[in-house]
Image (cartoon, rainbow, N blue to C red):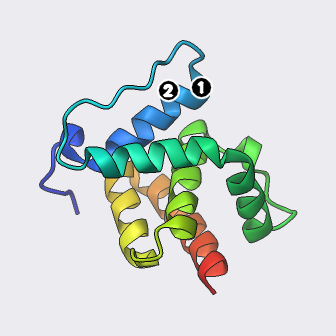
Amino acid sequence: MKTHFSPKNNPRVIIIQKLYGRFYNDDEQLSFPKHRFKKFIKDIVSGTIERNDLILEEIDKSLGSGFSFVNLDKLFQVILKSATYEFLYKPNLSINIIIKEYLNASNFFLDSSQTRYLNALLDNVGKKLRS
């Protein structure tokens, strides 16, 4: 199901783009243009960057030793990191809402088989972190 948002209005799409640029493009300057969710976007992007090491530890613990985060597609890495940040630091947002929002955003970047895999990863991490 496609959202009625255009990609540039979807806060999670913006979060993914900002983080992808920050993690994989050394020249990327972070800026946050006017947006009705600017505070939320800035919070998730900044928090994910600041707590990157802790987030990676949590992802590793949640997905287990047989799983290789570094072998994941870079886009998956970014989505997993930002969603994990939200699982950890946005307790007022339910796991299901966070996952649904990232899956909606991922439709702009991924095909449906990749989205199903992402769904399984997010579900796994979310349940372990919130249990």
Tell whether 41 sits left or right of 123: left
Tell whether 60 sits left or right of 55: right
For the residue labelled by badge 1, is the local secondary structure a helix, a strand or a loop? Answer: helix
Work out how far the residue at label 2 is from the one at label 1, CA to CA, in angstroms. Answer: 5 Å
Q: Residue furthest bottom?
A: 131
Residue 101: image location, x then y, percent: 34, 62
Tell whether 99 sits left or right of 107: right
Quadrant assignment, res 120? bottom right
* Residue under numbered circle 1: 24
Numbered tag placed on residue 103 in the rendering: none
**Which amino acid type is shown beneath numbered disc 2?**
Gly
From where the camera sits, is residue 58 visible? yes
State the residue at coordinates (34%, 52%).
Answer: 40
Count of marks overlaid on the render:
2
* Residue under numbered circle 2: 21
**Which amino acid type is shown beneath numbered disc 1?**
Tyr
Quadrant of image for the N terminus: bottom left
Could you say which is closer to the camera, residue 11 or residue 34? 34
Q: Pointer 2 and pointer 1: residues touching (CB < 8 Å)?
A: yes
Residue 103: image location, x then y, percent: 39, 59
State the residue at coordinates (45%, 57%).
Answer: 115
Could you say which is closer to the camera, residue 68 or residue 84? 84
Where is 30 relative to 63, above or below?
Answer: above
For the residue labelled by badge 2, is the local secondary structure a helix, a strand or a loop? Answer: helix
